[in-house]
Image: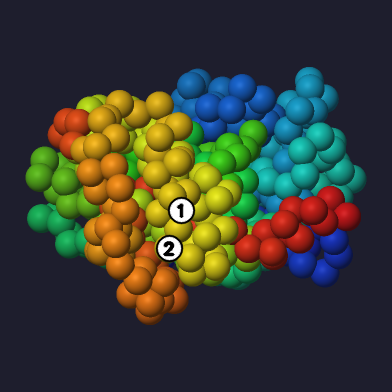
């Protein structure tokens, strides 16, 4: 995988949740980088979210590192949690890093305080492993219920030369876009202005991580952090459009992997809303269908139950006339003018519902807004994973 220049990686096995697995990762830029961040809108914001936001507000052009742990969310932990989070950044001074130049992120069980004695023991391992680990090692270290590491990369030829981007993320459950319900990290070796980098990240998140759902839950720890260290060439003018296009592709690749993983999920449901009265209505319609347990279990069971789709759409709050709505599954019109289209849908759609990706098209005929949302199905495995998450 193509890795942007000027970045090094390190991981450590700390035993935050279970022994024998890497659960702490560190990304270090060899030079100060321009940083951007998008964070959860959940009112209960985890300590690392609060600390990272504070660091970015004080100075987003001199960031040197991102440190991420799994197994401990450090959420709903009060002032002690914030103090512990800042203390973990101070510990990394042993690697020559200023605490104010490190962005923290955490994932895991909500409510537990960080095990600071384990963090202290981890610092020598991080120092020893720096530069010896790769992006795959980082992606593995931040996994919780993920079944595979999630990575994406691009190389872009600009007028001034070649730049590289790479991203990794974690996420499989507690996924409902209201920012980006997961942890995501993007690295780039282009030189950019902070204001553009931040705005580009927001735009790309809206079209990727904000356009997926697994179970309707928005986490306390969500964040997408992006570093651009300028060790390659500077992006200016029309080159910025090419760079943003590559950034969007990486975000969309990673977002798809989250829905594909989905804690026991077997299918990706691509919900295409067209003709909504507003973008807000398009969101309401798509999320009502994508988050419906009845629609999701029908998808898992390969059941073309259009009634569940229509019922979810009807309670979504989106504006439309019921007789104008058209519903298609896998490109076949199954509902229109307020009634089902008569056919042997169990037979006609049997093959399509066995596919990994199933399209559900909703024509509202109420305006011009449109939106595509990716959602997962629900399986027995999802219940098992989340029933046993803490135990």
Tell me if mark 2 has few (under 14), some (14-19) or many (20+) residues whose alpha carbon lies within 10 angstroms of its own: many
For mark 1, what is the residue?
Answer: 375
Q: Quadrant of residue 114?
A: top right
Residue 243 in the image: x percent, y percent?
23, 50
- Give the color scheme: rainbow, by chain, secondary structure or one colour: rainbow
Q: Is residue 312 above or below residue 84?
A: below
Q: Nearer the viewer, residue 256 or 81?
A: 256
Assess disc 1: are there few (<14), some (14-19) or many (≥20) residues with their C-alpha within 10 Å of its C-alpha. Answer: many
Against 137, residue 288 (above or below) is above
Mark 1 → mark 2, Cα distance in angstroms: 16 Å
- Residue 147 position in % (x across, y down): 63, 68
Q: Which residue is mark 2?
A: 304
Quadrant of the rendered image containing residue 254:
bottom left
140 to the left or right of 227 = right
For the C terminus, the image quarter is bottom right
Look at the numbered disc 2 and give the secondary structure of its residue: loop
Rendered residue at 81%/34% (across/down): 111
């Amino acid at each position: 995988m193509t890795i942007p220049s000027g970045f090094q990686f390190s991981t450590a096995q700390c035993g935050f949740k279970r022994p024998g697995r890497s659960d702490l990762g560190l990304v270090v830029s060899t030079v100060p980088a321009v940083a951007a961040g998008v964070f959860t809108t959940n009112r209960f914001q985890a300590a690392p979210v609060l600390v990272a936001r504070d660091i970015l507000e004080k100075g987003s052009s001199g960031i040197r590192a991102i440190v991420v742990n799994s197994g401990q969310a450090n959420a709903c932990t009060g002032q002690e949690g914030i103090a512990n989070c800042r203390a973990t950044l101070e510990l990394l001074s042993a690697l020559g890093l200023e605490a104010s130049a490190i962005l923290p992120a955490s994932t895991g069980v909500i409510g537990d305080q960080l095990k600071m004695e384990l963090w202290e023991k981890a610092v020598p391992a991080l120092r020893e492993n720096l530069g010896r680990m790769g992006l795959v090692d980082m992606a593995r270290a931040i996994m919780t219920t993920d079944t595979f590491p999630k990575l994406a990369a691009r190389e872009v030829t600009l007028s001034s030369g070649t730049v590289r981007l790479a991203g990794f993320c974690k996420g499989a459950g507690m996924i409902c876009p209201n920012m980006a319900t997961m942890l995501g990290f993007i690295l780039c070796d282009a030189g950019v202005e902070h204001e553009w980098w931040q705005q580009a990240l927001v735009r790309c998140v809206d079209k990727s991580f904000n356009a997926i759902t697994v179970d309707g839950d928005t986490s306390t720890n969500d964040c997408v952090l992006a570093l651009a260290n300028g060790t390659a060439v500077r992006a200016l003018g029309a080159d910025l459009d090419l760079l943003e296009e590559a950034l969007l592709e990486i975000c969309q690749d990673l977002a798809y992997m989250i829905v594909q993983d989905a804690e026991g999920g077997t299918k990706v449901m691509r919900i295409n809303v067209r003709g909504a009265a507003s973008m807000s209505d398009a969101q309401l319609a798509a999320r009502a269908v994508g988050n419906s347990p009845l629609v999701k279990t029908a998808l898992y069971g390969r059941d073309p139950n259009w009634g569940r789709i229509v019922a979810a759409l009807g309670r979504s709050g989106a504006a439309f006339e019921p007789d104008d709505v058209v519903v298609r599954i896998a490109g076949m019109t199954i509902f229109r003018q307020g009634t089902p289209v008569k056919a042997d849908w169990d037979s006609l759609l049997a093959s399509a519902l066995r596919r990994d990706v199933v399209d559900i098209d909703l024509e509202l005929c109420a305006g011009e807004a449109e939106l595509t949302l990716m959602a997962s199905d629900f399986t027995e495995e999802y219940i098992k994973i989340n029933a046993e998450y803490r135990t």
